[in-house]
Amino acid sequence: MHFDLSILLPHLGFLARGAELTAAACALSLAGSVVLGALVAIARTSASALLRRIAFVYVDLFRNVPFIVQLFFFYYGLPEFGIYIDAFTTGVVALSIAGGAYASDTIRAGILAIDQGIIEAAEVSGLSRRKIFTRIVLPIALRTSVRPLGSVLINMILTSSILSTITLNELTGSAQIVVSQTYRPFEVYVVLLCAYAALTYLVSLAVTLLHRHLNRDMMEAVG
Amino acid sequence: MLKVENVRKAYGEVTVLDGVDLAIAPGEVVSILGSSGSGKSTLIRCINGLERLNAGRITVDDFDVSKPKELAEARKRSGTVFQLFNLYPHMSVLKNITLAPIEVLKTARPEAEAIARKLLESVGLADRADAYPAQLSGGQRQRVGICRALAMQPRYLLLDEVTSALDPEMTAEVLAILAKLAAQGTTMLFVTHEIEFAREISDRIVFLDKGRLVVDLPTDRFFAADGGRAQPRVAQFLSRMRKD
Amino acid sequence: MRFSDFTSYDLILLAQGLGTNIALFLVTSLIGLLIGLSWALVRFYRVPVLAQIVTFLSELLKNSPVLVQLFLVFFGLPALLHIRVTPVTAATITLSANTAAFVYVIAVSAIEAIEREQVEAARVFGLTRWQVLRHIVAPQAAAFAVGPLVALMVNQLQVTSLISVIGVVDLTKIGHILNMRTLKPFVVWTAVGLLYYGAAKLVALLGERLETRLRAHSAWRGL
């Protein structure tokens, strides 16, 4: 039995670049998920029964099919239709679509939790439906959704490891390469495991701080 | 003129407004009294378009609230103050007041803010312009609500039980402001339980009972034994309210 | 290389693949449930040192990617301990441990949802910790835990798709094989996706039935 972490030292730079790729993919996918999630949340609360159905089917489908299958569907399937995009972009697209399904649920909950009276006040003052949505509903819903969206982000960071299966050299992919060079899978994967755990811990701390900051004006003063 | 003509409103089997007729001329202060469930709040919600009519017509300066294109114009001419304030929690007091003028009336921001600050001053909240609703007391929030409605320079101010959620001290501060507005000639239609207050500042009092407009008289006539009080329901209501 | 079209035998292949996923899902869920519950017991009895270890392990497993956990067990352990591990064994160990971590968290929060006063009252009456657990905590905790557990199960079924990456011939692997042979990725991955979707829905449905059964049972008891 032989456990030696020092063999990883020369490869830290390479691993760091992999981590950067993970961060980039997740940041872009988070943005994509929030945008898509907001659109789908709007569709699910819309007056049109067709829009509601489509939105429901989308959420249901992408929450009940394994991510790796979704990823392969895009990576191998899109070229069949003549759409050629690189692994990074495919990964971001797949993560955004999958993340959007979860994000839409949390944003929808945030929208439904808004006091009806506030919407009524906005309506009677003559604001258009679109203005009410962009200036009142969404800002309030997003503020209350920060924590659940943080969970979506954490989940996304863990799921991004699956992008290594489409030859993307994000953190997990880079680690696999390091293993093939050092022949020390145990050390590499233990460190990788701890790296992800540490990363998600930091993100959850950041999310708590963000939630507090955004909601500071909306918290009732004591007394 | 704000005209309510033969308005009927029902929720399923329950009729809440049963053929109500009412007309308010600019400058009038009219109070709507009645027991709970008599349809008072519903009437206000029909006038500002939050509820749809089943029958009848409501026009605000000849704009029909049942016609979607005219509703926007009607809403520009009326302002509503709510029982539960309904301030936008994520915006400062100043933003709450200037949002509609900027977005709907297309007023320039500096001008809208100047108007807002003047309004805040008139209600004694000039120093709270940058505070957020969560940091204010109930009475303060309602005063902001009044400013928010007035910022749109409405011709008709609709007030839906605006002091019912306040304690006696805050109620007094808000009523003082409403009295001032009435004295300045603001056209007001209010739903209230504050009978003494209604008696003091209203030109006319209207009594709703089970969705029907039973009495519509100038204030002193309303409280006279041979006027409004001659109606049994009114007498019953007034004596019950006096008991507390 | 000869490319061929789909044959009816392919349906059997797909079914076998799904069967592998389901079999692994059932086995690892059972083992994970038992381990997770025993960890919750450790926490309930506040066993020193062990309780902390168990919490740490659970956090680590919950906040790191399953793929990396699979690599650690399949590639890392053999290198460290100089043993042979088959893909199926590695998959079983990894998924059981991963499920256990989530079961632990669900069990702990279900137990904590029961008002402390009830437990205190029981202790004051002289009941031992075990009796309190058996008669007061466990039945109510079980009622609270069913919903989250069903959601966990649906998720873990999808997680089994990752075992294809370490070589287990499951539905995803079959998808790869069919794709290689027919070069029709769109059809193949759609079929694979729909099969996983169907399985997930089935688990969700059975879970719902179980939930209503349990709820009816406890409602009758006047809980």
Image (spheres, coloured by chain):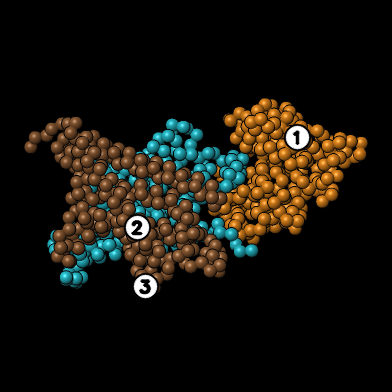
| x then y, percent, for residue B59 | 68, 30
Labels 1, 2: one chain: no
User: Image quadrant of residue B236?
Assistant: top right
Colour brown belongs to chain: C
Mark 2 = which residue? C34
Q: Are marks 1 and 2 in contact (CB under 8 Å)?
A: no
| x then y, percent, for residue C178 | 18, 38
Give C50 or A78, whichever is nearer the viewer.
C50
Report the residue at 37% width, 57% height from top.
C103
Mark 3: few, some, or many residues within 10 Å (few <14, many ≥20)? Answer: few
Colour orange belongs to chain: B
Q: Amino acid at mark 2?
A: Leu
User: Image quadrant of residue A126?
Assistant: top right
| x then y, percent, for residue A48 | 47, 32
Report the residue at 65% width, 54% height from top.
B141
Labels 3, 2: one chain: yes
Determine the CA span between mark 1 and mark 2. 63 Å
Colour cyan belongs to chain: A
Query: Looking at the rendering, in which quadrant would you find the N terminus of chain A?
Result: bottom left
Q: Amino acid at mark 3?
A: Val
Q: Which element carries disc 2, helix, strand or loop?
A: helix
Query: Looking at the rendering, in which quadrant would you find the C terminus of chain A?
Result: bottom right
Mark 2: few, some, or many residues within 10 Å (few <14, many ≥20)? Answer: some
Left or right of A167, for residue B178: right
Nearer the observer: mark 3 or 2; the answer is 2
Determine the CA span between mark 1 and mark 3. 70 Å
Q: Which element carries disc 3, helix, strand or loop?
A: loop
Mark 3 = which residue? C49
Report the residue at 48% width, 39% height from top.
A45
Q: Amino acid at mark 1?
A: Lys
Mark 1 = which residue? B210
